[in-house]
Image (cartoon, rainbow, N blue to C red):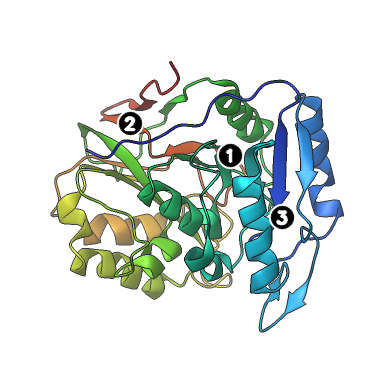
Amino acid sequence: MQNITFPKPLKKGSKIAIISPAGSVEIPQLDKTLELIKSEGYEPILGENLYTKYQNGYSYAGTEKQRINDINWALNDKNISAIWASRGGYGCQHLLQDLKLTEFKKNPKWYIGYSDNTVIQSYLLKKGFASIHGQTIKTSSFGVTEESYDLIFDILKGKNPAYKINSNPNNRVGEASGILVGGNLALIYALLGTPYSFDFTDKILFIEDIGENFYALDRMIMSLELAGVFKKINGLIIGGMTNMGKETENKDYEESYDSFAYQIIAERLSHYDFPKIFGFPNGHIFDNRPLIIGSEVKMKVSKEVEVEFSKFYS
């Protein structure tokens, strides 16, 4: 069994690196959360290219070299205690072959983000390090709950998350445990067959997504099926599925948990008897509660739904 390293809790005054590993951001999009970090007693340290823009078929936060330099600085600077991504978008895959962990291994730190940041978190887990799949510094157009950030700060302070959520008619009853892997489905799918893909054996898999056509959602689930992923995992947690299909045709387009997207997943995986949780509050949604990639979790699915994380701080 792989040994997973968990970073130490942060102290008052700890420095948190703020970087843009993928898409570009505007200054006003980050101001509120940067002030929140300060109010919690931490010092945000801005990456050199945090607000850089580089147009190359997409608005990246700098060239690949600029973004690689920023993330490697954040990973390896001994004065930095955590790394918080400004946003996702696209571009994190560009960085994987050039990531350096020389000093990081001596001083592991939390990496916080979701969406495109899934590939960074997969990379870190392959190297034996846990990370936080949670809200980025930039919030989406639909906003985010205060709790979404408060729960991240709880983890940084050393508190283990535990969630009780409402049941969903698509759920499959049962109990399972295993190390949590996953994140954004499109990126899990994009990493299949590469050296950077998650190891799914005996794991609990989490997936979420936004803005996909329904056939594309089915294609991604089908690819995981063909890759044997669902024969390996112990359980599945499905988070937000929003802005799916065509806005003019989908009555649930603005909903956090798209009913037809859930139907597609449930039908495709109906012959698997591992427990399944639908409607977990994590993803591109208003209520985005953090998960710890690399932590041992226990999921209980009955009339009540519970997800508990094993104690990882001594």
Point out residue 300 in the picture as x, y percentages from the top left corner. Answer: 27, 28
For label 2, the residue is 297
Point out residue 296 in the picture as x, y percentages from the top left corner. Answer: 32, 31
Point out residue 37 in the picture as x, y percentages from the top left corner. Answer: 76, 33
For label 3, the residue is 141
Question: Residue 174 falls in which quadrant of the image?
Answer: top left
Label pair 3/2, CB-CB below 8 angstroms: no
- Which quarter of the figure is the N terminus placed in? top left
Which amino acid, mark 3?
A: Ser
Mark earlier in primary sequence (3, 2): 3
Which amino acid, mark 1?
A: Asp
For label 1, the residue is 287
Question: Disc 3 and disc 2: Cα gap in Å?
Answer: 31 Å
Which residue sits at x=75%, y=76%? 54
- Which quarter of the figure is the C terminus placed in? top left
Q: Residues within 10 Å of mark 3 (few under 14, many from 20)?
A: few
Which residue sits at x=48%, y=67%? 97
Which residue sits at x=30%, y=64%? 221
Point out residue 11 in the picture as x, y percentages from the top left corner. Answer: 67, 21
**Callout 3: helix, strand or loop?**
loop
Mark earlier in primary sequence (1, 2): 1
Label pair 3/1, CB-CB below 8 angstroms: no
Question: Residue 203 falls in which quadrant of the image?
Answer: top left
Q: Nearer the viewer, mark 3 or mark 2?
A: 2
Which residue sits at x=39%, y=20%? 311
Q: Nearer the viewer, mark 1 or mark 2?
A: 2
Question: Disc 3 and disc 1: Cα gap in Å?
Answer: 13 Å
